[in-house]
Amino acid sequence: MDLAALTDDELISLLSGADFWHTQSVPGLRSVLVSDGPHGLRVQDTAGEHLGILDSAPATCFPPAVTLASSWDEELLSEVGAAVGAEALAAGVAVVLGPGLNIKRHPRCGRNFEYFSEDPLLAGRFAAAMVNGIQSTGVGACLKHFAVNNQESHRFVVDAVLDERTLREIYLAGFEYAVTHSAPRTVMASYNLVNGTYACDNHRLLTEILRDEWGFDGLVMSDWGATNDRVAGVLAGMDLEMPGSAGAFDPELRAALADGRLTRQDLQRCAERLVALVERSPAQLGPAADFEAHDALARRAAAESSVLLTNDGTLPLEPGMKLALIGAFAEQPRFQGSGSSLVNAVKVTTLRDALHERGVEVTYAPGYNADGSAPDPRLLAEAVTAAEDADVVVVMAGLPGTYESEGFDRDHLHLPAEQDTLITAVSAVNPRTVVVLSNGSPVLMPWVDAPAAILEPYLGGQASGAAVADVLFGDVEPGGRLAETFPLEASDVASDAYFPGAPHQVEYREGLAVGYRQEGAPLFAFGHGLGYSTFDVGAVAAEAEVAAGEDAQIVVPVSNTGTRDGSTVLQVYRHDRTGRVPRPRRELVAFAKVRLAAGESRDVSITVPARGFAFWHDGWQIPQGEHALEIGWSSADIRQTVAVTIPGGFTGTVTERDFVAPTPRPVRPYSRVSTIGELSGNPIGKILRQIALRVANYRDSDPATQVMIKRAVEEMPMRGMALFSQGKVSLGMVDALADLANRRPDRVVRSFAGWATRLVAKS
Ligand code: BGC
């Protein structure tokens, strides 16, 4: 493909999509299709849909990232990735828009279900495994959302302000790992700003760090509607505006080319990356997807990722007991989150169906309304009666869809109050009560000690009911370990006071104190999870000295001391004893998932990468002196410790620096990046909101999507009207509306004159 042969306009056309999901074609270059992701395909038949949440073609709905991450099993993540890739290949999709690997800074983030962990090592390793799986099929993957996109509130306009060390060690480290260990074909630049610059305009992030430091050689695309300043974006290395905006930015690109702010080489650099992506993309459709096999994989993945939080021995259940099944989620399951990742599942197995298929007789009582609507004392009473009469009770509880979704954050971490009441009441009449949760992020458990067992299978994908039954009856052991901390209260979370910040600025004042890196006792610790067997670790062997920059090797003897085959996860944390730098008490540096037969013992070799000792201080530094490696079952349950001394390395000392926050951008004067919500007191804003709500046409969507769309209308910057209107509204019109709202009629007249001139010139 000879880009030099293209006209300027053809070249410019390549830098944005042809429609909602396709890239542009020019003579000699075909167009390719990209689709959400990440835990199943969402291929839409409509090209120009406004907000992208219409029904999509049926696909396997695998468990989302929160669940898969709890498996701590990279092979499983790769297998799921390969299955999603195979479905993509069959559907003619060149790039699956995922995985998402943003850090769970606060459990209130509504999109946490779509992310892996609060820990960058886990996020990076699991994302890399998923990318490797997807790309093994020939289809490309897309790491998203780059970067520091850790909340849904104000996501289109908020500036994430953080210090360099926190940025590197927590928020970029996972992306760095995934880029350097899986070579994803694409990366998606997020909506928000990072330290004052939109991610899509951010040369430092997209070129200096992503490409120059980490060696990324793929294409960067914008999140949908995230493009801010296309000229700055081209210079920053943001190659592809998505979705296509019918050329909304083209006049600005042409003007920049004409006045020398951009050269043809600048445009060609972006276009070359698109050409490379298209040339690497499969040209033929793959064979039809094997939905049966994928359903079986979804089931296995969900079961192996389930985390058993507590158990007094009631689980696994013995066959033949009289079982009461309580909870509307047993019939109307919550198995995935809402928003752009919503998969139209090929089939759904509920827990009630799964128990029926096994021939297990149950007394069923819904107990509450699945949609979280008003408490119903009649349902509660009926459930308590059913519980009284049973040998064992299974209560399915969790968050209704409107509680957590892409597009908005949770206001609190509670379950619906009627579910807390139900669990307490049922456990009181029957102590052999097992609570099974359906949620995409931690919930508070004021009743934690009341039930006999608590199983956290999170959102289990389409086969969630079958997977839960497999675990309850012990066909599969709950192999999951928490990839996040469950706090006792939301206010215990270090970022709580700063989350989600103000519309234009969120300050990451808690720095490195994210999840288990902060002090204090949680409800359930990061890494926690029980199996159906028991394990023990013996004295760990390690070299006493490791040169700075070299990996450390350790050998951990581990035994299955129980009577069942099972798995465990050996977690290795580093405790820096050098005193040279303030650091979290412990940080995960390595792990190994180990499967052992009943009574079996094995020596497990684990590599602790040199990076595990490093901290950021004008580059990665390894402090000279003694470090402890702590091996345990969770961040709060350490069983063995071994000392390692690093002779060379950083010999200085570093102290905490003050957090300096800039003044947030003022609301006025209004501009393209003002949100409709900000204009709400203004007559222009009122009209715009009415138009936007009408265009969004959301009333037929599910309740969670309705909330998300209403929120998006309030929070979307005005430029979105141009980017999503398929050419009906230009950026010039948006600027003019902002001027009108600013009561600058002189500018409005100038803008109108500008359009008129362009319009005449065009015709
Ligand atoms: C989401 C992305 C998604 C895109 C396309 C955006 O709103 O943030 O994750 O891939 O829409 O649906």
Image: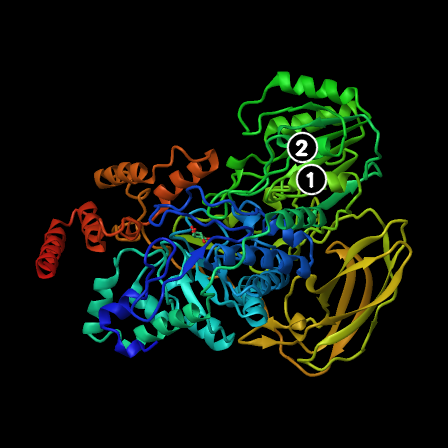
Mark 1: give few (<14), some (14-19) or many (20+) Cα within 10 Å: many
Colour basis: rainbow
Name which residue lies at 66% across and 42% down: 488
**In the rendered image, which residue does mark 2 sit on?**
353
* Residue 30 occupies quadrant: bottom left
The residue nearer to you, when weighing 147 against 723, is: 723
Contact between labelled residues 1 and 2, with CB atoms less than 8 Å apart: yes
Using the rendered image of the protein, determine whether residue 206 is visible from the camera's viewpoint. Answer: no
Identified by mark 1, the residue type is Ala
Could you say which disc has been placed on residue 466 in the image? 1
Q: Residue 532: horizontal and vertical position, in percent?
A: 82, 46
* Residue 510 occupies quadrant: bottom right
Using the rendered image of the protein, determine whether residue 675 is visible from the camera's viewpoint. Answer: yes
The residue nearer to you, when weighing 545 against 222, is: 222
Q: Quadrant of the N terminus?
A: bottom left
Asked if residue 226 is positioned above or below residue 442 in the image, the reply reads below
Badge 2 element: helix
Q: Residue 329: horizontal and vertical position, in percent?
A: 62, 32
* Image side of residue 669 versus residue 599, left or right: left
Identified by mark 2, the residue type is Asp
